[in-house]
Image: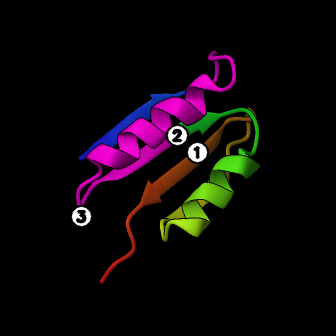
Amino acid sequence: MTIIIDGRDLQPPEPMERTLEALDRLGADDDILLLLYCQPHPLFNILRNNGYVWTDNLLPEGTREIRIRKPAD
């Protein structure tokens, strides 16, 4: 299952708060799709420190698609 968080029109820190809440519900085969207009460096540090993996793809219109998942065992 993919949990979608569209943070493009949300004010900080709401996108990070929603993402951190979604991490608690993330199953082994699930991922989070976070949509933003910026790179969330503080979130990346939290993900890195807690062993999550992610990809960051910049779309032509300026949206960043950040996919977050638990690492494979």
* Dot 1 amino acid type: Glu
What is the crowding at mark 1: few (fewer than 14 residues within 10 Å), some, or many (at least 20)?
Answer: many
Q: Is residue 56 above or below residue 50?
A: above
Dots 2, 3 in contact, CB < 8 A: no
Q: Which residue is mark 3?
A: 28
Measured as percent of width and height from the top left, residue 60 is found at: 73, 40
Residue 9 is a magenta residue: yes
The C terminus appears in which quarter of the rendering?
bottom left
Residue 37 position by quadrant: top right
- Of callouts 1 and 3, which one flags the residue occurring earlier in the amino acid sequence? 3
Magenta residues, start to end: 7-33
What is the crowding at mark 2: few (fewer than 14 residues within 10 Å), some, or many (at least 20)?
Answer: many
Measured as percent of width and height from the top left, residue 6 is found at: 52, 27
Residue at horizontal 56 percent and vertical 60 percent from the top: 47
Q: Report how far apart the C-alphas of labels 1 and 3 lie in the structure.
A: 20 Å
The label shown at residue 34 is 2
Q: Is residue 61 above or below residue 51?
A: above
Residue 34 is a magenta residue: no
Q: Is residue 11 left or right of residue 2?
A: right
- Of callouts 2 and 1, which one flags the residue occurring earlier in the amino acid sequence? 2
Residue at horizontal 68 percent and vertical 43 percent from the top: 59
Residue at horizontal 67 percent and vertical 59 percent from the top: 45
* Dot 3 amino acid type: Ala
The label shown at residue 65 is 1
